[in-house]
Amino acid sequence: MNRAIQREKRVRSLYLYQMLSMDAPLGEQGATLRDFLPVQGDFTNGTAFRDFLFRLPRDLHDLARCLLDRDSLEEARSSLGWSQMRMCGAVERLREHLEAYEKI
């Protein structure tokens, strides 16, 4: 029973990581979080995206900053001192905000 529980936790953690990795597609157009980062020589999109992140609630801003610094979700969770449940909620909320931003 214990092994089955541990296996389920690993599967859920992997699913959570894939849900909001830097390469996970957002919305209908399939943009990724990396697509919002500035292209070399063009700072307009990057400035708008960073302004958007700054206006997010503090916990989502901190999570996005960790992900943009290429932390894994587990590293971000650990450095932010969050529980697994809080992390799941924040990931879902951040994903919703990013999908709304992508529609702009």
Image (cartoon, helix red, strand yellow):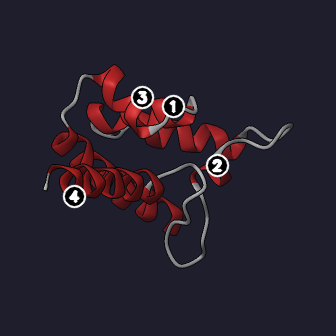
- Quadrant housing residue 55: top left
The residue depicted at 21 percent of the width and 40 percent of the height is 84
Q: Quadrant of residue 16?
A: bottom left
Q: Say whether disc 2 or disc 1 marks the residue closer to the N-terminus.
A: 2
Viewer-side residue, 75 vs 22: 75
**Rendered location of residue 1, percent (x, y):** 13, 56
The span from disc 1 to disc 4 (Cα, nearest Å) is 28 Å
Residue furthest bottom as drawn: 28
Cα–Cα span, label 1 and label 3 = 6 Å
Most foreground residue, 2 or 57: 2
Question: Pointer 1 and pointer 3: residues touching (CB < 8 Å)?
Answer: yes
Which of disc 4 and disc 3 is earlier in sequence?
Answer: 4
Q: Residues within 10 Å of mark 2 (few under 14, many from 20)?
A: some
Of tags 1 and 4, the one toward the viewer is 4
Whole-number angstrom distance, CA of label 2 to CA of label 4: 35 Å
Question: Is 27 above or below relative to 13?
Answer: below
Q: Residue at x 86, y 37 (%)?
A: 41
Q: Which residue is mark 4?
A: 4
Q: Amino acid at mark 4?
A: Ala
How far apart in space, not on screen, are marks 3 and 2 (Cα)? 19 Å
Number of the front mark, 2 or 1: 1
Mark 3 is on which residue type?
A: Glu
Tag 3–tag 4 contact (CB < 8 Å): no
Residue 42 picture location, percent across and down: 80, 41
The residue carrying mark 3 is 75
Q: Residues within 10 Å of mark 3 (few under 14, many from 20)?
A: few
Query: Which circle's residue, 2 or 4, is located before the other in the chain?
Result: 4
- Of tags 3 and 2, which is closer to the observer? 3
- Which mark, by number, is residue 71? 1
C-alpha separation, residue under disc 2 versus residue under disc 1: 13 Å
> Mark 3 vs mark 2: which is more N-terminal?
2
